[in-house]
Structure formats: C-alpha cells, structure tokens
Amino acid sequence: MPDDRSPNKAFSPAALAALAIVFALAAGTTGLRWGLPYIWHPDEKVELAANMIDYKSFDPDYFINPHLHLYAVRGLVWIAERMFPGQMAFGMQSIVPMTHPDNPNRAVQMAGNLLARGFSVFCAVAAVWWLWRSLRRPLGEWPAALDD
C-alpha cells in the first residue's frame, strides 16, 4: 500500500496535534502559582465566586465577562472552602498577611486560586483538542497550510 505522505513531512497530524496540546498545557501551567496566595490579578473571578458563596447567591452582580466560567469557578471555590476551612481575603490590605506561611486563610486562598487557574488550563487544552478534532475531517489529513 503506497504511502501518500511526501517524504518531507516528518510528523503525522496526530503528532502535530499532540505537540500543540503539550504546548498549550506547558503555556497554561507556566506561572500557575504567580502572585499566590494573595490575589491581585483583576481578571480572576475568584473574588466574585467567593462573594456569591458568602451571600448564598448565583447573582455575581457583574455582567461583563462570560458567566459559564464564573459559575464553574464558584463551584471550585466552594470545593476549596470545604477542603480548607478559612476565609478568603481580597484587596491590597490582604497581600502582606497572606505572605506569612502560618496565616490560617492561606490554604483556602491557594486552593481556590489554583483550582480556578487549573480549570482555565483545562479549558485551553480542551479548546486545542476540540479545534483539532473539528478541523481534521473538513481539512483532510494534511491541510494545504501544512504542505511545503
């Protein structure tokens, strides 16, 4: 059976997809612990999720960013609060106290943020996988963009 791949193609489409997934995973996990245990990145929704839990509400009182992610983070923060009892702290006043290793709230703060960030990495890797699966058939095994 003849091989319809030309000799200059060193990687199969599956190998390229695996490489893209590994790259997405590496890019997503690099800096996963940046700035923790205190929170100062304005795009992280952990504070909104913690507030919804504290107020026993599903209303984030914030309708700018996508909500599916916000509600997923709410669930992850709820899990973190059950795993590590404590109170999450937000704002500039919480930075210095959270740097102390014996702070009783440090564990829940770390867990909530790491779970939320890990979920974002999962979503990024899943998006790369889904894109490959979705485009594999319509574009063929070797899309023209990959030809030399």
Image (cartoon, helix red, strand yellow):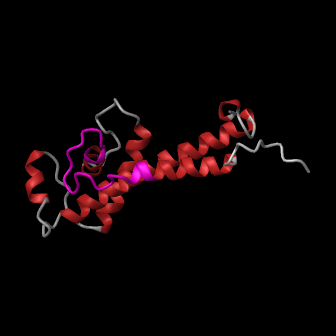
89 to the left or right of 108: left
Q: Could you tell me which quadrant the C terminus lies in? A: top right
The image quarter containing residue 41 is: top left
Asked if residue 25 is positioned above or below residue 84 in the image, the reply reads above
Q: Residue at 24% of width from left, 39% of height from top? A: 42
Residue occupying image coordinates x 32% and y 61% = 80
Q: Residue furthest bottom?
A: 102
Tell whether 84 sits left or right of 69: left
- Whether residue 123 is situated above or below residue 82 in the rendered picture: above
Q: Nearer the viewer, residue 35 or 56?
A: 35
Percent across and percent down for residue 125 are 51, 48
Residue at the far right: name it.
1
In the image, the segment drawn in magenta is 26-47
- Foreground residue among 134 and 78: 134
Q: Quadrant of residue 102?
A: bottom left
Residue 9 forms part of the magenta stretch: no
Query: What secondary structure prevails in the magenta region?
Result: loop
As rendered, which of 23 and 113 lies closer to the eye? 23
Percent x, y of residue 5: 78, 43
Q: Please provide percent x and percent y for residue 6.
A: 77, 41
Residue at 10% x, 45% y: name it. 92
Q: Position of residue 124 (x, y in %)?
A: 48, 45
- Residue drawn at (34%, 29%), measured in percent from left and top? 64
Residue 108 located left or right of residue 25: left
